[in-house]
Image: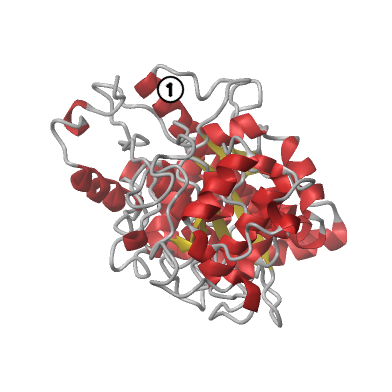
Amino acid sequence: MNPNAPEHQPHKARDVAIVRLAREKMFSSPDDETAKKLNKRMDDILAIASPPSPEGVRAFDDLTDLRIRIRIQNKRKFQAQPLPQFPLFTWTPTADESNVCTGVRVNSRQGLRVLDPDAGTPAVCTESYLQFICDYANRWHSKLTGINYHSAGSDPRFFFFPSHQTFYNQLMSSTAKEMARETSEHLTRAQFWKLRYLFILINFVPNLQTDAHVALCAISPEAKTVDYVCSGGDTGLPNSPRSAGSRCVPHIFAWLASFLGNSFFPYDWRLRTDAGHVQERSRGDCAIYTVTHAQCLAFGYGITDSFPSDHQTKILNRRRRYVQDLMYQGFVDFKDGEENTQYYPLLDTKPTALRSEGFYSLPGAVLELLPAEVANKSICYRDCPSKLALMNHCQRNARFYPGWEARQVSGTGRTLEEFVRWVENMDAMRHWKRYTEAARPLPYPANQPFRWIDPRDSARNVCPPHALWPRRIE
């Protein structure tokens, strides 16, 4: 059953209308009642940080002055007495209640700091928000499909890698095998392949800078894609236009290759690095953009059309809505007769890897970091039954495999695994057009065929004409 409101059911509302509604809600100010609650919490903080003020309910724009006063008061109190404890602002469900949440607790000072337009977002708020996103998406898909994606102990459809604050440093300083072992503590391979999205935060300090920056890595096992989404224009690659970028994308694929083992085929995966909406560089809004990109992917809106064209000017509204979502502990299902302030309609949009959407094959910078036996591995040889079948493949594609009959390639004493690796290396050189002299394709038409023939396909005017082994139905 589709959990959306009656007016948002597929037969009544088009996807584009739902995306537009969600976009307007995400980037609009909270309602008056919510604004009063937030202002009341600000006054409560002020009462803790300094003597009570007779000014009453505060406007959002006064928070910058409030933050300055808190900083001064805290500095004075640090010299005289311990800092007071701030009230609890929000918390995520515990691991006993959800398969993605860990019981993160956020105090009022952390939660309300996001309203300061000049402040960055506390990491604990970002973690909480991503947990709320994944938990809501898992609950929605559980109701849609009748499969439990959200309870403790069940396999999630959306997952947030928990060691987000240290993930980037671990990724760049550890070996791929060490990262694979770290991953297996939170996720099995079987669980990974059931995910629609795995969200990872990339927290790094750009070179020659002091302030941290955060980007989103959204991995879709369902579509076999990696989305590196950065509001600062970084691509995560060595040739990024942002010279002080993270350079982590090659390491992400090396980690995936090690974690997934024989089920990772690099030519099946696609990468996108330029889908993110760019923030105003002089502001600390990167975490706001990061969680909003994640929310749009998890809720099925996509990235391209889910931000308003004037998102930079509306980012303060987005900050306020972000704090509202934290205060109300995330998102709730639609309930008839209620205000449904925290309800968002979701779309069951299956992720794709289309070139028209900006996805492309893995670049050389990624493949060069993979071991050769992984970088050149192709899925079409996964079910090759014998050396004879592979010989037939080389024979009917003889133009592309010069020397395949050689004893040191396919002769007695060479295993099927070794023969497959030689064929994959030849395919890789052809793909990248980087040949050794002995591997260069033979001239056409003296040598046939003109185009390479997949061993799982039949073909005319070749021997043998039938498929050499069947395609596996996933």
Picture coordinates of residue 73, whole percent (x, y): 71, 62
Residue at image coords 60%, 50% = 200
Residue at image coords 52%, 71% = 441
**Apparent side of residue 296 relative to residue 330 in the rendered image (left or right):** left
Residue at image coords 30%, 52% = 23
Looking at the image, which is closer to me, 459 or 194? 459
The N terminus - image quarter: top left
User: Which residue in the rendered view is the most extreme toward the left?
Assistant: 12
Picture coordinates of residue 214, whole percent (x, y): 60, 62
Three-letter residue code for mark 1: Ser
Q: Is residue 358 visible?
A: yes
Looking at the image, which is closer to me, 164 or 83? 164
Instruction: Please tell me how crowded label 1 is: few (under 14), some (14-19), or many (20+) other residues with Cα within 10 Å.
Output: many
Picture coordinates of residue 63, whole percent (x, y): 51, 62
Q: Is residue 319 above or below residue 446?
A: above
**Apparent side of residue 413 relative to residue 233 in the rendered image (left or right):** right
User: Which residue in the rendered view is the most extreme toward the top?
Assistant: 146
Secondary element under disc 1, as helix, strand or loop, is helix
Give the residue at mark 1.
Answer: 142
The quadrant where residue 471 appears: top left
User: Which residue in the rendered view is the most extreme toward the right?
Assistant: 80
Picture coordinates of residue 319, whole percent (x, y): 45, 57
The quadrant where residue 213 appears: bottom right
